[in-house]
Image: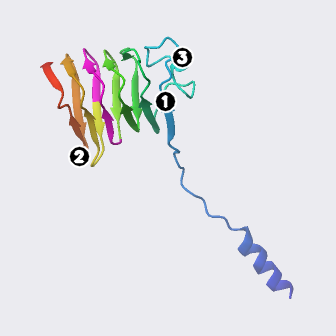
Amino acid sequence: MRRQNKRKAIQYSAAESLEDRVMLAAVSWTGAGDGTNWNNAQNWSTQAVPGAGDSVTINLTNSQTIVYSSSACNTTIQSLNGNDPLSITGGSLTITGNSTLTGNFSMTGGALAASGSGVTVSATGSTTLSGANLTAEGGATLSLPGATTYAG
């Protein structure tokens, strides 16, 4: 009887470790900070600048142009969807999930990358590109059908 209890205790003490999980967070533009700067945490619903694993929505009625800038700003996000105007003037923004921007989009510097197999990042509004670094990597597609000019 004693031997059987010892065996049960050993069986119950084993535990299986699980892999780390990244939970996607929904982050929305509120414009409650300065109303224009992507890097101002007060402009976001989470009071934090979006980062890896975040699904970002910029869809605020009558929003000013949101400016993603600063050469020191290198951000990767899960997705970016909405109709607010967006301007990238510096830094690097990488998007790893399907995304659609329907508002005006401009780049006068910086880098935009779509990354991942089967990922499509599309800017369908009026698009102006000047000095932009555009990349589609790992089987992704970067679609800019509203582009009227490009000077690279």
The single residue placed furthest to the bottom in the displayed view is 1
Q: Amino acid at mark 2?
A: Gly
Q: CA distance from mark 3 to mark 2?
A: 37 Å
Q: What is the x, y in percent for residue 123?
A: 26, 31
113 or 4, which lies in front?
A: 113
Badge 2: how crowded within 10 Å, few (<14), some, or many (20+)? few
Badge number at residue 139: 2
Q: Secondary structure at mark 2?
A: loop
Other-residue count near label 1 (Cα within 10 Å), few / some / many at <14 / 14–19 / ≥20: many
Q: Name the amino acid type tagged 1.
A: Ser
| Residue at disc 1, secondary structure | strand
Left or right? Give the position of 105 relative to 20: left
Q: Nearer the N terminus, badge 3 or badge 2?
A: 3
Label 3 with label 2: CB-CB less than 8 Å: no
Which residue is under mark 1?
28
Residue 21 location in percent, x, y? 53, 49
Give SS at disc 3: loop
Q: Earlier in the sequence, mark 2 or mark 1?
A: 1
**Residue numbers of the magenta segment:** 97-112
Disc 3: which residue:
32
**Residue located 76% across and 80% down the image:** 7
Q: Residue at x 47, y 25 (%)?
A: 29
Position above or below: 103 against 69: below
Image quarter for residue 55?
top left
Apparent side of residue 64 relative to residue 41 in the rendered image (left or right): left
Work out which quarter of the rendered image holds the N terminus and state it.
bottom right
Residue 31 included in the magenta stretch of the image: no
